[in-house]
């Protein structure tokens, strides 16, 4: 959004007032009235257009800002369409049913939430994508939790925690590469440095998930047996069902672009569904758009497998467009530039620099709901601040990840928050208290911030 130039420069007090007003509006509608986020964000857009008119910003200038901001999210839009297709193709090929069924054999009630957290962390590091991890192995674990009568909210919190641990620590992750590139730090030096705060957050989260994990009962064993029988009755479970997952992992390791990786895995799943599971052409392409509809005699499995398709992503995609357009208006009216400039001028010490960076990254996630902009804008704003405070660039990159990447899924109207709630069927406000890794990361990074680092030491570290 740096191509969007502010057409007005409000005072810091005025910009802060407008910001609080729009956040209060969005929060009241979503949390208080439990309205879908699209409506309050659209109302926020109307409010900002009115504010722009008051300061003689033409509608054409505001419209251009909204369009340019929305353009920046088109890459994500295409990926979301493909993730919808991936989910449905993995169901009709038997990949997701096979993952769930295998999980029942490998995982019992002991340490269930902790195992969910660890496995999603491993898959997250392997794939480098929190959304893909959530949409694949995450769906499988939600199904297992339902069968075991475990808490869906805690399970979703464990899935989100693991997926975003992977998003932070994987060299294949877009956000990890962006955070290191924006401040000019070597990627693997960045990953080593963020482990200083990420590993403690991981260990604490793991211990808490162990403590919260339920004990296995005879009732849960009976429920699991019913799930397994219904899954096997679909005739979707066989060895070939592992192929789409293997293709996705291999493509990720080979650094094949995400669009191509998802396409190849989806096509493989579709071919398996046609050749081995005997889906007709009409059924295949219908599943691509509308998703798969479960037809077993066991209703909980039907609900679990009725997912996917491009159509299921339209809710999230429409929110992406609205949220980015909203962000464009915050820029063209000068609200965000004014606040960022004031923050930049007042930071002098190392600890204040870290706290301000974390607060800004979290704030942008809350205001705009987009993690890439949170990393990009905060990184650009604080590079000179960290230099003046004598802090190494990788300290900035670490804070961007700790307070930027992992906070997005905790915002009900954010891109990740809406996507995850839609895919897992658990609202953000339900899983938020249990996404321990995401909650701990910014706290630990602030506690970790310390004394000023000399220029000589900075050069040695880098």
Image (spheres, rainbow, N blue to C red):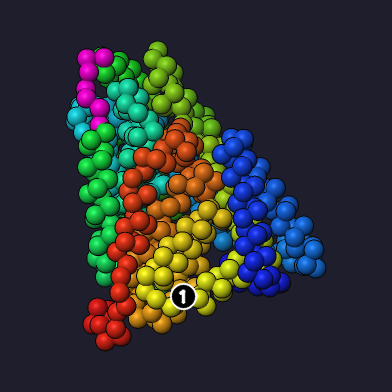
In this view, 292 is above or below 448: above
Instruction: Tell me which segment is drawn in magenta.
Output: 213-219
Q: Is residue 340 visible?
A: yes
Residue 182 left/right relative to 60: left
Residue visible at 48% across and 36% down? Answer: 427
Q: Position of residue 327 (x, y in %)?
A: 61, 59
Which quadrant of the structure image shows residue 219? top left
In this view, 167 is above or below 287: below
Q: Is residue 183 magenta?
A: no
Residue visible at 42% across and 16% down? Answer: 299
**Which residue carries the number 1 mark?**
347
Quadrant, the N terminus? bottom right
In this view, 196 is above or below 426: below
Q: Position of residue 260 (x, y in %)?
A: 41, 53
Q: Position of residue 132 (x, y in %)?
A: 39, 46
Most distant residue in the bottom direction: 456
Give the camera-side residue of 203 and 462: 203
Residue visible at 52% across and 78% down? Answer: 345
Give the camera-side residue of 62 and 13: 13
Residue 241 left/right relative to 24: left
Residue 351 left/right relative to 75: left
Q: Is residue 122 visible?
A: no
Quadrant, the C terminus? bottom left
Q: Main secondary structure of the magenta part?
A: loop
Estimate how packed mark 1 is, as few (under 14), some (14 to 19) or many (20 or more) residues with alpha carbons within 10 Å: many
Q: Is residue 215 magenta?
A: yes
């Amino acid at each position: 959004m740096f191509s969007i130039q502010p057409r007005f420069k409000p005072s810091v007090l005025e910009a802060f007032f407008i910001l609080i007003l729009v956040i209060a509006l969005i929060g009241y509608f979503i949390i208080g009235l439990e309205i879908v986020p699209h409506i309050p964000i659209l109302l926020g857009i109307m409010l900002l257009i009115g504010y722009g008119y008051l300061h003689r910003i033409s509608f054409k200038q505001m419209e251009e800002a909204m369009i340019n901001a929305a353009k920046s999210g088109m890459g994500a839009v295409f990926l979301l369409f493909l993730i919808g297709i991936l989910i449905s193709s993995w169901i009709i090929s038997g990949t997701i049913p096979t993952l769930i069924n295998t999980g029942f054999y490998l995982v019992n009630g002991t340490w269930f939430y902790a195992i969910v957290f660890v496995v999603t962390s491993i898959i997250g590091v392997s794939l480098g994508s929190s959304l893909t991890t959530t949409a694949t192995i995450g769906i499988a674990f939600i199904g297992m939790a339902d069968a075991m009568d475990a808490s869906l909210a805690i399970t979703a919190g464990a899935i989100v925690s693991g997926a975003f641990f992977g998003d932070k620590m994987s060299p294949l992750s877009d956000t990890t590469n962006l955070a290191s590139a924006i401040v000019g730090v070597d990627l693997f030096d960045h990953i080593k440095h963020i482990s200083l705060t990420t590993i403690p957050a991981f260990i604490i989260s793991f211990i808490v998930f162990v403590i919260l994990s339920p004990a296995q009962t005879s009732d849960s064993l009976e429920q699991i047996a019913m799930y397994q029988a219904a899954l096997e009755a679909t005739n979707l479970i066989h060895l070939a069902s592992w192929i789409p997952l293997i293709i996705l992992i291999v493509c990720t390791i080979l650094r094949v672009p995400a669009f191509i990786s998802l396409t190849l895995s989806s096509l493989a799943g579709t071919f398996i569904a046609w050749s081995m599971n005997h889906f007709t052409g009409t059924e295949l392409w219908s599943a691509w758009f509308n998703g798969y509809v479960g037809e077993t005699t066991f209703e909980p499995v039907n609900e679990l497998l009725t997912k996917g398709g491009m159509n299921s992503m339209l809710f999230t995609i429409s929110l992406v467009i609205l949220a980015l357009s909203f962000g464009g208006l915050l820029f063209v009216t000068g609200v965000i530039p004014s606040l960022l400039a004031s923050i930049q001028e007042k930071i002098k010490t190392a600890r204040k620099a870290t706290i301000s960076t974390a607060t800004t990254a979290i704030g942008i996630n809350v205001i705009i709901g987009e993690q890439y902009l949170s990393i990009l804008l905060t990184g650009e704003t604080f590079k000179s601040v960290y230099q003046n405070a004598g802090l190494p660039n990788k300290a900035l990159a670490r804070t961007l990840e700790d307070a930027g990447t992992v906070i997005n899924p905790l915002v009900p109207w954010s891109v990740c928050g809406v996507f995850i709630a839609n895919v897992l069927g658990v609202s953000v406000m339900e899983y938020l208290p249990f996404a321990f890794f995401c909650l701990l990361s910014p706290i630990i990074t602030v506690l970790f911030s310390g004394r000023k680092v000399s220029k000589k030491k900075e050069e040695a570290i880098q």
